[in-house]
Image: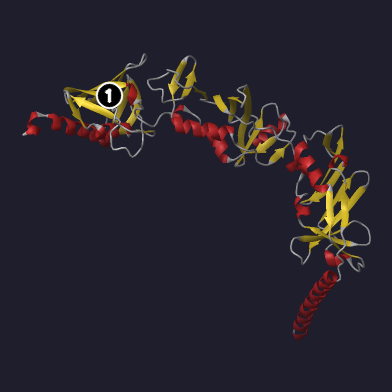
Amino acid sequence: MRRQKRLIVLLAVLAVCIGDAVILSRIDFEEKMTGTQTEIVNVDSSEITYLSWNYEDETVAFSYSDDQWFCDDDSQMPVDQELMAEIAESLSQITSDKRVEDVKNLGIYGLDDPQYTMTIGADQTYEIAIGDESFTDGEVYISTGDDYVYLTDAGLIDKISYSLYDLVEKAEIPEMASVDEITVDKENGVDIVYQENAGYCYSDAYTYYLKDGDNYTQLDNENTEDMISTLSTFSWGDCVNYNVQDSELADYGLDEPTASVSIQYKDEDGNTHEFAYDVGTADDQYYAKAKDSAVVCMIDESVFNAADTASYDELKPEEVILLDWDTVDSMDIEMDGSIYSVSISPNEDASSEEDSEEPAYIYTLNGSEIDFSDAVDELTGMTLDPDETAQIGENKEELSMTFRRNTENYDTVTLTFYQYNGTYCIAVLDGEVLGCTARDDVVALKEAVNTVILDQSPDSDE
């Protein structure tokens, strides 16, 4: 037992000694280095016709002919020509500022079994092996098959840090100056258009609409814009198949895509184009493929979810009402059996500055100016609960507001709140049920209106 322990200790000491010897050899090598400047490779990138290297246990090789790069192992692979041109350019000039002329053992520098090798073919062929990093920061040992070992910038490794799938040319996701229409084809799909001042609804503040034949329904501006941005400005992830066959589409959930996205857009010159792709999922991964492309790439989950969940319920307006108050001349408020008429006019003394103390509008009731800002704030701040739905039955009317406007269309807009339960009221706009809004907000609106009315009553002057 003691002999075994002694043997283990001796072996450990031997390993340390060998390690120290290697380190000392390398230190000795670097101390004896000459400062010789050497051009390892010096060619014009246009003269390079062959490139190969190994990366992550994979060797890739590409040849250049007829003004294109081709994969030597698979001529069907769509090669990223721009990236290959960049790699060729980066490898056309490789220099060294130090070398050792008396190489005793390549293993000292990691060159007996190099981590990387590359071949550059031009008028002559350059074979380069890349070994360990040196004690000098940012440099590696290389050899070219001659009698020397050289030091060069360690960035050389980054220039060949590409696997085969990194070099696949993916479908271009175009720059879109504006999106006119986006269609998400799936079960209960949506067709969304962008239109300013369309007159499709009571308020031109809405710019996105759900299109259903000749019918248009306003959508929430912010949520719809976020969805469109996600579906139109994403980036492809890793390529997983560059020549997918129909029999392989099921591997990525693309035999029956979760959704097909089609985007009608304008470029910077105002020309209209279309960009379309399918999305799918398999084994908790998310994939996409551009139309008429055989390249399948991974995509971020957010892109998949945006297409998968696109629906009116997800994109319908959150606000109860969205009015341009410049278009409203007056409003009739029906509450507790009484009707009150409030006139509205722009305040000419108001400033456009946010910190202006003058209100933007002047409100009058029964010929007297009133402070109606609290009631308006309560109204414009009301939102719908997307998770709560209801239909009008024998529900009692709680509050009704009719807005009289100076517009050609929708010159009268009526918003009515009906009792539903202790938590919600039902909001109805021009006879169409919008959804449920918090009963507390409706009560707060009524109280704000009542405060103004009570201030205008004869008893308030006493």
Q: Residue furthest left?
A: 462
Number of numbered tags placed on the structure image: 1
Q: List x then y, in percent, for residue 438.
A: 30, 35
Q: Is residue 417 left or right of residue 146?
A: left
Task: Give the quadrant of residue 62.
Answer: top right
Can you say whether 10 is above or below 352 in the image?
Answer: below
Residue lying at 59% horizontally and 25% vertically, measured from the top left: 265
Seen in the image, is 144 located left or right of residue 461? right
Residue nearest the observer in this picture, 343 or 308: 343
x and y percentages locating residue 28 in the rendered image: 84, 73
Which quarter shows the C terminus? top left
Q: Specify the quadrant of the image occupied by residue 148.
A: bottom right
Q: Is residue 278 above or below residue 83?
A: above
Per the image, the residue denoted by label 1 is: 345
Q: Residues within 10 Å of mark 1 (few under 14, many from 20)?
A: some
The quadrant the N terminus occupies is bottom right
- Give the residue furthest to the front: 349
Question: What is the three-letter code of the residue carrying label 1?
Answer: Ser
Q: Residue at x 11, y 29 (%)?
A: 457
Q: Secondary structure at mark 1?
A: strand
